[in-house]
Amino acid sequence: MNEPKLPSDKRAFFLSMRMPVYVGLGIATFVILLHGLASIFGWYWIFRWFDTPMHVLGGILAGHSGIVCSVFFSKDTKKKPSLWIAIFAALIVGIAWEVLEYGYGLSGLDPIHRFDAIKDLVNDMMGGVIALLVWDLFIYKKLNK
């Protein structure tokens, strides 16, 4: 079967976006697998600190996804993505996750839970910053060589 013919610049753009999408799928698989194992084996309750790296990893995934969407919709791999896109994407996903935790009764409105939620959101945003750093150091260079 023949692939549909695209103008060469569009085809090159779509082919160049495959690697960032595969990286995102790899990150998503890792985060989902680790969260599933942590939920099954109770790692969130055994290791109180386990929540922190999971929020950073979730922020990396959300930030990377935001960057990929930004580059895809702008159709310009030459322009470096904004830090704000990565942070905002991580923050949106982090807020949604905190609402989910509240809905399942895993957090409350008392001061300790509020501090934990703020700490989690900061960790999510740190993950967004890490996603942008990884994008700049590895992916951006590959897309524009």
Image: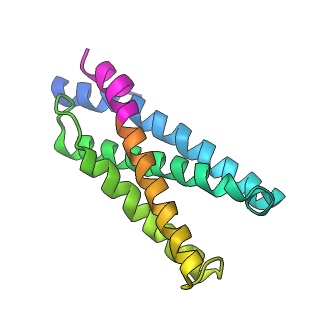
User: Total number of numbered labels?
Assistant: 0
Q: Residue at x 74, y 55 (%)?
A: 38
What range of the chain is rendered magenta?
Answer: 133-145
Name, please, the residue furthest toward the front.
111
Residue 12 at x, y = what percent? 25, 24
Q: Residue at x 17, y 26 (%)?
A: 9
Observer-nearest residue: 106 or 117?
117
**Residue 11, picture quadrant:** top left
Residue 30 at x, y = what percent? 62, 42
Q: Is residue 111 above or below residue 30?
A: below
Q: Main secondary structure of the magenta part?
A: helix
Residue 57 lies in the magenta stretch: no
Residue 144 lies in the magenta stretch: yes
Q: Is residue 6 left or right of residue 120?
A: left
**Residue 35, picture quadrant:** bottom right
Q: Is residue 98 left or right of residue 15?
A: right
Residue 24 at x, y = what percent? 47, 40
Q: Would you say residue 4 is visible in this rendering?
A: no
Name, please, the residue furthest toward the bottom.
109
Q: Quadrant of the N terminus?
A: top left
Q: Is residue 109 above or below residue 135?
A: below
Q: Residue at x 59, y 74 (%)?
A: 101
Q: Is residue 125 above or below residue 115?
A: above
Residue 90 at x, y = what percent? 40, 55
Observer-nearest residue: 145 or 54?
54
Q: Residue at x 71, y 55 (%)?
A: 36
Q: Quadrant of the C terminus?
A: top left
